Image: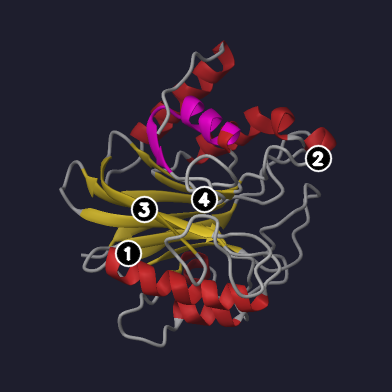
Amino acid sequence: MHTPRALPRLAATLTLAFGTLAAAQPAARLRVMSFNVRYATAPDGDNAWEKRTDLFFETIGRFAPDLIGFQEVLAVQYDAIAARMPGHAFAGVGRDDGARKGEFSSVGFRRDRFTLVASGTFWLSESPDKPGSKSWDAALPRICTWVRLRETGTGRELVLANTHFDHRGKIARQEAARVLSERLGPVAAGVPAILTGDFNIDEDNPAYAVLTRPARPAWIAWIDAYRTMHPERRPDEASFNGFKGVTRGSRIDFVFHTRHFRATAAAIDRSARDGRFPSDHYPVTAVLEAVP
């Protein structure tokens, strides 16, 4: 975790918005967001990170998440997020060295609602505890970061995990779903769990079946919050936009949850400003309630 730096007046205004909106949410509900930030060093011209930073934080502020998973986060972005969202605590490591090098799949949670019980990161490879490891046909190292949280008001615990599957390796994505299932089963044993991420798969991919229809009893049967709220598949469900505002296509970004929750809302946030988007992915959101 990182100490927030001094903020300009605009950042302070946005920080106030985060706190005000978050405090207004009913305590029984969890507002969850998954957001691929697009890495800061990409040669994106008018869509470069420094030109969309304010819009990025405004987008998050409007939803006011209790829990959030980020993908493609470089260290400079991790620091900026921690500074601009001081009401949230964050966990994550760089995938190349298990410290600050390479992309993070970081997670955030509201400080006034949760305390950290435990956290960890594993690699989606044949050597899950080895930083920088990759296997099968993966183009890059891939990770999953998780936190176990205790809700301050109730003492109840939950697990939030966040990941980013490989963009090229077909075998790697399916194997990543298996590794994730094997690792998160024990981590979340006996408690509710939420899984966010850019999975680079659609609902027809075998990796999706591994997650939602697991082959082993010890593996979590993840529930797709968006599909629960929108049972009929449509041709305009794209969650990747390439900074072009496209809608045709399938979701590759998801919010999953265990049977301990029910979704009451789920959306693909396609908000823009002057034709500009906060990232090349739309953030995806869900509102979850605990099942009595």
Residue receiving disc 4: 105
Secondary structure beneath label 1: strand
Give the residue displayed 21% in from the left and 68% down from the top: 190
Disc 4 is placed on an element classified as loop
Q: Earlier in the sequence, mark 3 or mark 4?
A: 4
- Dots 1, 4 in contact, CB < 8 A: no
Q: CA distance from mark 4 to mark 2?
A: 21 Å
Sequence-wise first label, 1 or 4:
4
The Cα atoms of the two marked residues, 3 and 4, are separated by 11 Å
Quarter placement of the C terminus: bottom left
- Identify the amino acid type marked 2: Asp
Q: Which amino acid lies under the numbered mark 4 shown in the image of this protein?
A: Ser
What residue sits right under mark 2 in the picture? Answer: 44
Cα distance in 3D space between marks 1 and 4: 23 Å
Residue that mark 3 sits on: 120
Please give the range of residues in magenta: 76-91
> Which label lies toward us, 3 or 4?
3
With respect to residue 87, does 202 lie above or below?
below
Question: Viewer-nearest of labels 1 and 4?
Answer: 4
Q: Do the residues bearing badges 3 and 4 touch, measured as CB atoms within 8 Å?
A: no
Question: How packed is label 2: few (under 14 Cα within 10 Å), some, or many (20 or more)?
Answer: some
Which residue corresponds to mark 1? Answer: 261
Asked whether residue 232 appears in the rendered view, the answer is no
The secondary structure type at the circle numbered 3 is strand
**Would you place residue 37 above or below residue 285 in this image?**
above
